[in-house]
Image: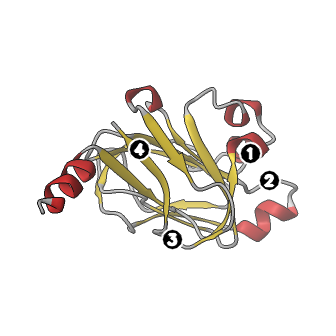
Amino acid sequence: MFEFLKKNKKEDNTDILGAPLKGTAIPSSEIKDPTFGQEILGKGMAIQPVEGKVYSPVDGSIAVVIDTKHAVSILSDRGAEILIHVGLDTVSLKGKYFTTYINTGDVVKKGDLLMEFDIDALKAEGFEVVTPVIVCNADNYKDINRVTSGQVEVGDKIIELVK
């Protein structure tokens, strides 16, 4: 009896991030860039994408679209600060192979298309396309549960943040 109250209380303390890309989930420790691999910017995981489309993992607003279009920061409606960074060292491309569909300040819903990138062109030029998904304000949460292996589809739960 009253199990529904317990469920709602848990949901009030939990923020769920969906996969922003389709691909293979991997732990941060396997990212070859120390900024992401050592979780200097925050805690998270990464996805080795199989297609060049990035979707919003949450309902929220766009905090920053990096001018080189390779990364976006989102503030979820529940307060999570999320960085999605496509590839490693892709900032050097200055936007080449990237198309964004959002601007700083835009309101987004989970599943909205944020950007596209030419995955084959990036690989052909020798860039890693592994995409870190980082919670930059991870210290605000008492527990962070991450999916760090296996195939994920866009929208699948990849990170659970518990306050």
Q: Residue 23, which numbered label?
A: none
Q: What label does residue 88 carry, if any?
A: 1
* Residue under numbered circle 3: 154
| Residue with the mark numbered 2 | 128
Secondary element under disc 3, as helix, strand or loop, is loop
Which marked residue is nearer to the observer: mark 1 or mark 4?
Answer: 4
Label 1: how many Cα within 10 Å (few below 14, some 14–19, many 20+): some
Q: Amino acid at mark 4?
A: Leu
Label 1 and label 4: CA atoms lie apart by 25 Å
Q: Residues within 10 Å of mark 4 (few under 14, many from 20)?
A: some
Q: CA distance from mark 3 to mark 4?
A: 18 Å
- Of labels 1 and 2, earlier in sequence is 1
Q: Nearer the viewer, mark 3 or mark 4?
A: 4
Name which quarter of the figure residue 104 lies in. Answer: top left
Label 1, secondary structure: give it. loop
Going from the N terminus, do you reach mark 3 or mark 4 first?
3
Question: Marks 1 and 3, how far apart in space?
Answer: 21 Å
Disc 1 to disc 2, how far (Cα)? 6 Å
Q: Position of residue 40 (x, y in %)?
A: 63, 26
Residue 161 badge: 4
